[in-house]
Amino acid sequence: MKSHDVFSQDKVTLSGVVSDAESNETLIGVNILFPELQTGATTNEYGFYSITIPKGTYQLVISYLGYSDISETIFLEENLNKNFSLSEAIESLNEVVIKENVEKLNIRKPQMSINSLTSNTIKQIPVVFGEADVIKAITLLPGVTNAGEGSSGFNVRGGAADQNLILLDEATIYNSSHLFGFFSVFNPDAIKDLKLYKGGIPARYGGRVSSVLDIYQKEGNSNKFHVNGGIGLISSRLLAEGPLNKGKGSFLLGGRATYAHLFLPLFDIENKAYFYDLNTKISYRLNQNNNVYLSGYFGRDVFSITDSFKNTYGNSILNFRWNHLFSDKLFSNLSLIYSDYYYGLDLGFIEFNWNSGIRNFNLKYDLKHYISNNIKLQYGLNSIYHKFNPGEIEPSTPDSGINAEKLIDKYALENALYIDVEQQISNRFMVSYGLRYSSFLRLGQDELNTYANDQAVIFNEDLQIYEKADPTGTEKFKRSDVIESFGNFEPRLALAYELNGSSSIKASYNRMSQYLHLLSNTSSPTPLDIWTPSGKYVKPQILDQVALGYFKNFKDNTYSLEIETFYKKVKNRIDYIDGADLIANNAIEQIILNGEAKAYGLEVLFRKNLGRFKGWFAYTLANSEQRTPGRTSNEPGINNGEWYKTPYDKTHDISITASYNLTEKWSFNANFLFQTGQPVTYPNAQYEYNGLNIPNYGLRNEYRLPNYNRLDISATYVPKPEKIKGWQSEWVFGIYNVYNRRNAASISFQQNSETGVNEAVRLAIFGIVPSISYNFKF
C-alpha cells in the first residue's frame, strides 16, 4: 500500500494563507491541488485555506491565473500550517497561450449564476470619459442591464435597482452611482475582488430579492510603499498603499475627484456638477490566528444651479473586522459595520433646506468550518438596526416664509441566522444547500396613521380611480414597541453534476425576502428617491427563483461556455396608483398597493480566456412583467389588473467585449452593445380644454423607446513595458459611441409654443465622446 493511500484512516490537515509575493496582499480563490488524490481546496475571502487528507508524501500544486504555479513535494505526518506567496507570471507575446488574470469557469462547484471580474478586466473596458467603471463593466454580462445612459443603478434578470444588495467590504451601499450614473462609486484601483450573484445565492446573503454585488477592497501593500493613479480629461484618481509594520500591517488610501466644473466659469457657466470620494483601509496581523481590518468609504456628489439650487448626496461606510482562527478547520470573522446614505437640497430661491437619508448599524458574525474535504459549513448571524429619515425641511434664512417641518422618522431591526453546506456526494456530484431565517421588526415611531378597515388606499367607484384614504386617527408608540413583525424561512439549494472533465450541468433554487423598499416611480433611481421599511401597510417582498445551466470548458480552458435559463417570481412588489406623489409624503401608504412581479429568460456567455485576443459574447433573451390585481371583485387594480412590462424589461440584450495585445507596447479594446428599447407609456389620444391640447395616456408601458446600440473602442500605449520597477505609465485613448448614435434616453410630449400641437421630443445624453487618460504607478 502506498504512503498516500486514499483509504488511510490517519488524516492530517494542511492550512494557511496564500498571498501576493510582492505586496503580501491575500489572494481569493487560489487553487490548492493534490493531483494524485484528485482533490483540492480554494482560499476564502481572506486568503485562508484548509484541506484534510491522509498522511503521506504528495505533489502539491498551487495555481492561480495570472500567477506562476508553485509545485513542490510535501511530506505530511501531522497537522501543518503553511503559507504560500505567489509571483505574477511573466508574459510573452510570442507564446501561443498567455496566462492572464482572467475569470475561469469552475465546472465542479455547484455555484451558478455568478460572474466574477478582476480589476484588470474592468480597466480594459472602454467607457465614457475614459474612467474605468465597475457598474458599466457588469452591465456587459448576461442578465444585467441599466436604464440607459446617464441613469444610475443596474437591473439583474428583470429586477428593479433597489432589489440589488450592493456590498463594499460587507457594508451596504445604497446608491452606487456618481453624477446621476455617469460614474460608479467604486474606485477600480482599490478593488481586490468582485462577484455578482444573480441566482443560486448562498444563505449567508439576504435582504434583497434580485442580486448580490459583493466587492472587497484591497488590503494594501505590507512590504513596500506603492502609488498608482490616473489623470483624465474631467477626473483624476490617486491611491497610496504601504506597510505599517513591514510584513504585518498595511494601509491603503485612495481618492478620486472631478474638476471639469472648475473651468465652467471661463465660459460664463455658473452651474456645477462634480463628485469626490475616498477609500481607506488599515490591515494588521496580530499573530498567526488573529487579523484586524478597519475599512471605510466616503463619497459626495454636488450639483448646483447658480446660487439658487444645490444638491448634495452620497454614501459613508465604516467597518471594523476581526478574523480569528479557532483551529486549522474553523475560521471566523466578526464585523461591526456603520452605513449611511445622505441626500440634501439647498433651495436658496425659496429659502429652505431639505435633507433625508437612511442609516444603519450592523453586527455580523460568520464562521467557516472545514469539516472534511467533502463537507464544508458556513454559518452565522447578523443584526441590523435601521433608522430612516424620510425628510426634513428647515428655513435657510431668518426671513424665510417656510415653516420647519419634519417627516416622521421610521425605525426597524432586521435579524438573520443562516447555515450553508457544501458537500461532495461523489467524484462527479456536488451539492450546496442552506437555510436562512430572517426576521424584521418595525419599531415604534412618534405616530402612525390609522385607517378604516386598515386600508390606506380606497377605490372611488364613481370615478373608477384609486384615491388616498383619509386617516381615522393616529397611534403613538414608544421606540421599543413593535408595530409589526415579519419572519421568513429562506431555503437555498444548488446542484452540480460533472458530465466529464470539461463540462457539467447545474441547477439551483433560492427563496429570499426583502424588507426595505425604494420609493421611486421612475425607470432609473434618483438620489431623491426614499427608502422605506415594511410595516403595517407595506409587506416584504418574497422571491422564488429557479435556474438550470450547462457549463463547458474548451481547449484547456482557452474557451468557456455558460448557458442558463431562469424563472423568478416576486410577491408584494410595490406599485403606485395613478398620480402618486412621492415627494415629501408623510403617508406613503396612501399611494401604494402590493402587487407581484415575474421574470424569465435565457442567458448565454461565451468567453475566450487566453491568448493575445480575449473577450466574451453575452446574449440575454428575457421577459419582465408585473401586475397589481384588484383587492376585491369591484376593483380593477392597476392597469386593469393585467400584466404589464416593467421599466427594466429588455427582450434582447447583446454585448460583445474584446481585447487584443498587438505588441508589448500597444493593446486595443472594444465593446458593442445592442438592447431592445425600454418600455414606456405614451399618450394615445388628446383632448382640448380651454384652448389647450391635453394628452391622454394609455396602458402602462405598452410602448418602447427605440432600440439602443453603441460601439466603444480604446487603445492603450505603454511607453516602457520592460520597466517593472520605478515609474511605470500608460496612455489610454478612447472613443465612446464611435458612430455617434443619438440613443434616446427618454421621449417626452409637449405642446409646440408656435403651432399649439403636441409633439414628441427625444432626449439623447451622449453622441460621440473622445477621451484620453494617463495612468501611472511607482
Image (cartoon, grey):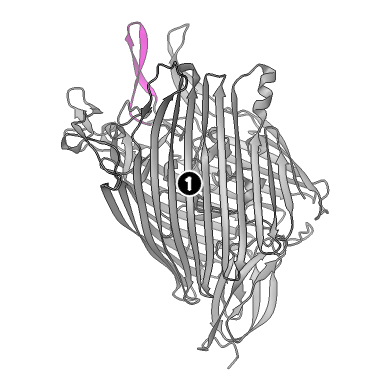
In the image, what residue type sits under mark 1? Ser
Estimate the x, y position of residue 328 in percent, counting from the top left: 54, 75
Outermost residue on the front side: it is 398
Q: Is residue 513 visible?
A: no
Q: Write down the quadrant of residue 596 in the picture.
A: top left
Question: In this rendering, would 482 be left or right of 397?
Answer: left
- Can residue 136 be seen here? The reply is yes
Tell which of 391 and 96 is nearer to you: 391
634 on left or right of 482: left
Residue 467 spot, x, y in % from top left: 24, 27
| 699 falls in the magenta region | yes
Is residue 145 located in the magenta-colored stretch of the structure? no
Q: Nearer the viewer, residue 285 or 501?
A: 285
Residue bearing the label numbered 1: 339
Image quarter in which the N terminus is found: bottom right
Please state if 128 lies on the left or on the right of 730 as rendered. left
Q: Name the residue located 53 percent from the left edge and 55 percent from the top edge.
A: 320
The percent position of residue 508, horizontal first and vertical second, equals 41, 60
Give the residue drawn at x 34%, y 29%. Answer: 585
In front of the other: 462 or 42: 42
Question: How many numbered marks are there?
Answer: 1
Residue 516's place in the image compared with 11, above or below, is above
- Within 10 Å of the Cα at label 1, are there few (<14), some (14-19), or many (20+) other Cα atoms? many
